[in-house]
C-alpha cells in the first residue's frame, strides 16, 4: 500500500498512527503540497490533490476518516476498532464528526499561532476549552472516547490533543483526558520519534512561510 502524506499534516497523523498500531507496512510517499513537483505527482493519483491519499491494490482513497474506516475494516483482527454493532458504531461516528467539526480546527489553529509567537484570540481559546471539556465528559466512565474499547475515533482525537500538548496547554484540570492521553501513547509504536519529527517539520514549514 502506498500512502501519500506528510507527517506534519494533522489529517495524515491519525492514519499513520493507526497503521503503526495495526502493524501495517506502508510505502510512505512524502508529499509537500507546497512543492510544485510533488504537488503534480499527487494530482496524478488524486484529482482532489489532498493528503492523506491511500492506494491499496489500485484502490485510491482520500480523506483521513474514510481511510481510518477502510484500514480498520480491512486489516484489523476484529471489529473493535470500528464496531459492526450499529449503536456502538454511531458513537464512533459522532466522536469523529466532533473532532472534524469542532476540535481539530481549533486546536491546530491555536498551535500554529503559538509556534509563530502570535497571540491566540480569546474566542479560539474558548473553543479549545469547550472542546476539551466535552472530551473530558466522553471519558468520564470509559477508558476510551467511544466506550470501553479502543476505536479509530481515539486516534483522530489523540492528534487534536497532541496539538494542545505541543503548545503546552494545561490539561491538569482534565484528569480523564490526561489518563487517556497517556494510555494512547502505549498503543502507537515509535510515537515519541514521530511526534519529534512532527514538531520539527511543522516549525520548519511555518518559519519558511513567515520569511
Image (spheres, rainbow, N blue to C red):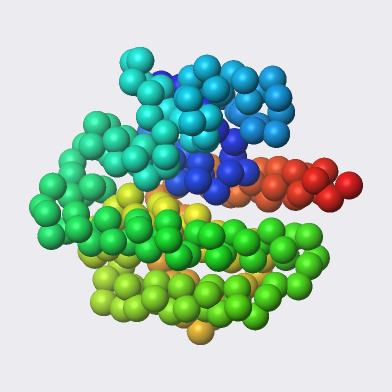
Q: Quadrant of residue 119?
A: bottom right
Say left or right for 56 vs 195: left
Residue 153's quadrant in the figure? bottom left
141 on left or right of 206: left
Q: Residue at x 47, y 78 (%)?
A: 130
Between residue 175 and residue 51, name the one nearer to us: 51
Q: Nearer the viewer, residue 120 or 23?
A: 120
At 26% from the left and 57% from the top, the residue drawn is 92
In the rendered image, the residue lying farthest to the bottom is 173
Whether residue 110 is visible here, answered yes or no, is: yes
Q: x, y percentage for residue 207?
A: 82, 48
Is residue 183 visible in the rendered image? The answer is no
Left or right: 148, with 191 as reference point: left
> What residue occupies the far right of the structure in this picture?
211
- The picture places residue 172, in percent across and down from the top left corner, at 54, 80
Q: Position of residue 205 (x, y in %)?
A: 75, 44
Q: Residue at x 62, y 61 (%)?
A: 109
Q: Residue drawn 66% across and 69% down?
A: 168
Residue 15 lies, with reference to residue 187, above or below; the image says: above
Depicted 162 relative to depicted 34: above or below? below
Amino acid at each position: 500500500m502506498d500512502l501519500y502524506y506528510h507527517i506534519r499534516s494533522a489529517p495524515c497523523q491519525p492514519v499513520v498512527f493507526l497503521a503503526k498500531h495495526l502493524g501495517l507496512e506502508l510505502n510512505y510517499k512524502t508529499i509537500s503540497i507546497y512543492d510544485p513537483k510533488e504537488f503534480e505527482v499527487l494530482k496524478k493519483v488524486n484529482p482532489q490533490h489532498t493528503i492523506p491519499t491511500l492506494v491499496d491494490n489500485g484502490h485510491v482513497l482520500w480523506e483521513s476518516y474514510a481511510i481510518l474506516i477502510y484500514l480498520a475494516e480491512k486489516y484489523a483482527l476484529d471489529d473493535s476498532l470500528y464496531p459492526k454493532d450499529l449503536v456502538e458504531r454511531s458513537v464512533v461516528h459522532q466522536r469523529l464528526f466532533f473532532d472534524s467539526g469542532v476540535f481539530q480546527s481549533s486546536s491546530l489553529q491555536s498551535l500554529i499561532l503559538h509556534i509563530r509567537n502570535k497571540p491566540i484570540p480569546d474566542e479560539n481559546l474558548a473553543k479549545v476549552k469547550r472542546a476539551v471539556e466535552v472530551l473530558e465528559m466522553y471519558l468520564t466512565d470509559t477508558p476510551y472516547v467511544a466506550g470501553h474499547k479502543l476505536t479509530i475515533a481515539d486516534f483522530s482525537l489523540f492528534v487534536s490533543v497532541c496539538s494542545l500538548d505541543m503548545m503546552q496547554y494545561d490539561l491538569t484540570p482534565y484528569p480523564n483526558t490526561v489518563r487517556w492521553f497517556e494510555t494512547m501513547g502505549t498503543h502507537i509504536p515509535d510515537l515519541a520519534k514521530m511526534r519529534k519529527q512532527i514538531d520539527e517539520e511543522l516549525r520548519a514549514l511555518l518559519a519558511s512561510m513567515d520569511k
